[in-house]
Amino acid sequence: MIAPTTRKDLMIVNMGPHHPSMHGVLRLIVTLDGEDVIDCEPILGYLHRGMEKIAENRTIIQYLPYVTRWDYLATMFTEAITVNGPERLGNIQVPKRASYIRVIMLELSRIASHLLWLGPFMADIGAQTPFFYILRERELIYDLFEAATGMRMMHNYFRIGGVAADLPHGWIDKCLDFCDYFLTGVDEYQKLITRNPIFLERVEGVGIIGSEEALNWGLSGPMLRASGIKWDLRKVDRYECYDELDWEIQWQKEGDSLARYLVRISSRRNSRGPYENLEIRRFNRIKDTEWNDFEYRFISKKPSPSFELSKQELYVRVEAPKGELGIFLIGDQSVFPWRWKIRPPGFINLQILPQLVKRMKLADIMTILGSIDIIMGEVDR
């Protein structure tokens, strides 16, 4: 009888671009030695639509409907960064009322984005139930968006100098009702997921990133805060009216997939902080005369359709759910930007993937990729 020989050659496997765990059209060329990952090469560009070049041939108002197609799960942030650049170039001050409305929309969008990260992430590692839970809460947020903007996903709500329309009557009360309800939902997730031994076995100690390593790779958002660095642009840059609000940066120091999960789920509870602050500044006019000032009564300063971008360059950024979303903008005394460079957080965060998955098991690729939280619309632009 001939003894079986052990084969030593490596196997090269294509994961994606149609694999359900790729979160879009991402392709990974994975080199395997049995179940061990030897190498991993991400292939991008399947969803490239020339978003930066389109921006250079459109006015800001014409371009706003396009930007919600970058990160289509956190659309308010792409709109915010698109109007923040021209506002800085033109030195346009946004009325307080509009700034408060923007913050409410941004934080609701942050919650919705983290919810739709959690569901597929749990499905990737074998838990189907949370996917149905997150859709329940997300629909309520989209109901609020629909009432305020007319659209559930692609809102086209932000404008240079403010927002497109005021909040409808009773909207704030509905929003506060949602916040109270959502806190019980977060407790439900904690019981269902955080203490689950099978879940902990899959994520604890998987995909560890040290603090120095995170800085060297240029990571941002939950990826950076999960590695022990308390960095949040809402605290650092104090844009909009975040400096008036009282909330804490959520962070962990372990740097693994579990830490990234904990940062995101605790930031959901934290996103209620701005609402508790804004509840004090109720939008109906109280006897206090300050509420009758221009700042609190108007939602926008309408710029001309032929609004020109002054001849200078600047970089603006916001703290999006996935990290630092930035725009490098060059004006040329024209209605069109001369240069419009997008800095998507998902693209920068994805760079560390090959290093994280090496010497891990094949099944851990899903866990690590899911914990990074990418949307290919913004990665490929």
Image (cartoon, rainbow, N blue to C red):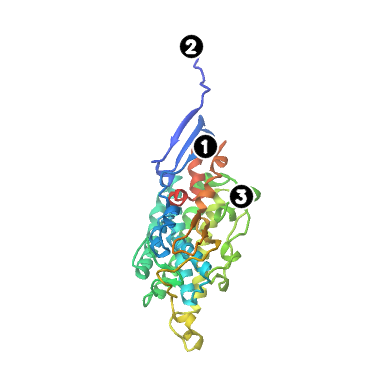
Task: Name the spot of residue 377 as percent of width and height, x first.
Answer: 43, 51
Q: Position of residue 12 (x, y in %)?
A: 47, 30
Residue occupied by mark 1: 40
Amino acid identity at mark 3: Ala
Q: Left or right: 301 with respect to 203?
A: left
Please identify the quarter of the rendering in which residue 221 is found.
Answer: bottom right
Q: Which mark is residue 214?
A: 3
Query: Mark 2: which amino acid?
Result: Ile
181, above or below 373, in the image: below
| Rendered residue at 49%/35% (across/down) | 30
What mark, if any, has residue 2 been given in the picture?
2
Going by the numbered disc 1, the residue's amino acid type is Cys
Q: Position of residue 61 (x, y in %)?
A: 40, 65
Q: Is residue 14 above or below residue 221?
A: above
Q: Label 2 to label 3, Cα distance in Å?
A: 52 Å
Residue closest to the eye, 136 or 57: 57
Above or below — where is 156 with respect to 355?
below
SS assignment at label 2: loop
Q: Residue furthest left?
A: 150
Disc 1 versus disc 2: distance between alpha carbons? 36 Å
Look at the image and tell me whether residue 348 can be seen: yes
41 lies left or right of 302: right
Which SS class for mark 3? Answer: helix
